[in-house]
Image (tube, rainbow, N blue to C red):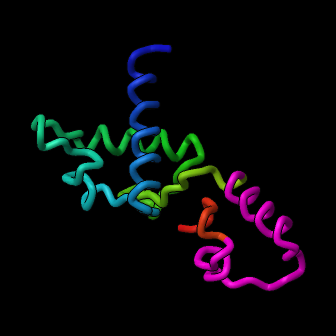
Amino acid sequence: MNTRKKQVDMWIDFILDYTKFHKLSQIQLNQHLNSPLFCNSKINRKLSYESAHYILEELVKKGNAEWMDKEKTGVYVYWYKIDHWASLIYKYITDNNMIDVVCTPYELTESVTVEKLELNL
């Protein structure tokens, strides 16, 4: 694996970990470029707009993000790929005998039974 690909993969892992930890579902480049996501003030280093955009493009290609607009100024971040989210939801529903039961998003994310699951956003 070449150095550039390894760096991009590390950035992707960092972005996914960061957004999951901070429960962020969106990254707006102009808004987050000076945030700890792309800027380390302790060592006075910052990712350029072009580099951050490139990494987000790779995140989209990997299936962990989707562009918010045609100008590609921000992304919706998926900590997990959509099929993994679907599997988590399906497992929760089958484990709790909820097939053919109408559930609200609140019930899937805030109820007592999901507090310890990854669905509890």
106 up-or-down from 19: above or below: below
In the displayed structure image, the side of residue 23 where residue 45 appears, left or right: left
3 up-or-down from 48: above or below: above
**Residue 24 highlighted magenta (yes or no):** no
Residue closest to the eye, 21 or 77? 21
In the displayed structure image, the side of residue 104 where residue 30 appears, left or right: left
Q: Which residues are magenta?
A: 84-113
Residue at the spot 45% in from the left edge and 14% down from the top edge:
2
Q: Position of residue 105 (x, y in %)?
A: 64, 80
**Residue 87 highlighted magenta (yes or no):** yes
Residue closest to the eye, 95 or 60? 95
Residue at the spot 46% in from the left edge and 63% down from the top edge:
25
Magenta: main secondary structure: helix
Q: Position of residue 81 (x, y in %)?
A: 63, 50
Q: Position of residue 108 (x, y in %)?
A: 67, 75
Residue at the spot 72% in from the left edge and 58% down from the top edge:
88
Residue 69 figure quarter: bottom left
22 up-or-down from 36: above or below: below
Residue 14 figure quarter: top left
Residue closest to the eye, 33 or 113? 113
